[in-house]
Image (tube, rainbow, N blue to C red):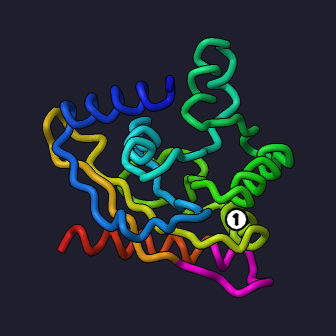
């Protein structure tokens, strides 16, 4: 109940703040999947989380969970803490468990926000999750959320990607990043 109320409020706020366009929603499968996303703004998880067909789960830096009320609210939105800069086994196990349960799991390939619109090098964490879960990855390009009021912003969900078992984690991460860059490039033309 709380989740749907908050999601609706965020959805309405974003549609007041931006002129939003969503493309490729049909590419999100019924079962488990990983949304591999670029990251430029604090609006990114809100934008994607309010424009997916089911509840999205996502890692968020553990510092955001220090305030108990904010931590409770984040957990209602499907977020759970991750220790950045190290291999956080607990959060990785939780991510894999969510995928085994058929959920939507989202991850920012770069691990942190880019200061520009250009993607940074991807972290291999997404490659690990894809390799272990064998879940399809939906390359997800988020754009326009750093612009002013009523500017065009949106999301493009690409075609699902699958990878051969045993493939190198860095190669997987790089392939997903390239797919996001192609979505970005297609928006510019």
Give whichever of 12, 65 is nearer the camera: 12
Q: Quadrant of the C terminus?
A: bottom left
Residue 60 vs residue 54: left or right? right
Give the residue displayed 71% in from the left and 56% down from the top: 101
Residue hosting label 1:
124
Give whichever of 133, 109 is nearer the camera: 133
Name the element at disc 1: loop
Q: Residue 24, percent across and down?
A: 33, 67
Q: Residue 39, percent across and down?
A: 46, 50
Residue 67 vs residue 40: left or right? right
Magenta segment boundaries in residue numbering: 161-172
Give the residue displayed 22% in from the left and 54% down from the top: 21
Is 117 magenta? The answer is no
Q: Residue 9, percent across and down?
A: 34, 26
Give the residue displayed 60% in from the left and 45% down from the top: 57
Residue 105 vs residue 24: left or right? right
Give the residue displayed 80% in from the left and 47% down from the top: 86
Q: Residue 168, percent across and down?
A: 75, 80
Is 168 magenta? The answer is yes
> Which residue lies most toward the left here?
150
By secondary structure, the bulk of the magenta-drawn segment is best described as: loop
> Which residue lies most toward the right here?
89
Q: Quadrant of residue 5?
A: top left
| Above or below, comparing residue 130 to residue 37 in the picture | below
């Amino acid at each position: 109940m709380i989740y749907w109320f908050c999601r609706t409020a965020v959805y309405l706020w974003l549609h007041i703040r931006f002129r939003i366009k969503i493309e490729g929603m049909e590419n999100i499968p019924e079962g488990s999947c990983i949304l591999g996303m670029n990251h430029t703004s604090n609006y990114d998880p809100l934008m994607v989380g309010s424009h997916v067909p089911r509840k999205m789960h996502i890692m968020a830096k553990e510092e955001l969970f220090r305030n108990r009320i904010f931590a409770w609210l984040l957990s209602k939105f499907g977020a759970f803490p991750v220790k950045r800069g190290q291999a956080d086994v607990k959060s990785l196990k939780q991510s894999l468990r969510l995928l085994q349960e058929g959920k939507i799991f989202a991850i920012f390939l770069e691990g942190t926000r880019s200061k520009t619109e250009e993607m940074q090098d991807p972290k291999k964490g997404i490659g690990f999750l894809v390799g272990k879960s064998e879940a399809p990855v939906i390359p997800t390009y988020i754009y326009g959320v750093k612009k002013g009021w009523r500017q065009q912003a949106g999301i493009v969900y690409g075609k699902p990607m699958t990878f051969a078992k045993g493939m190198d984690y860095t190669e997987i991460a790089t392939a997903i990043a390239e797919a996001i860059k192609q979505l970005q490039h297609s928006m510019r033309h």
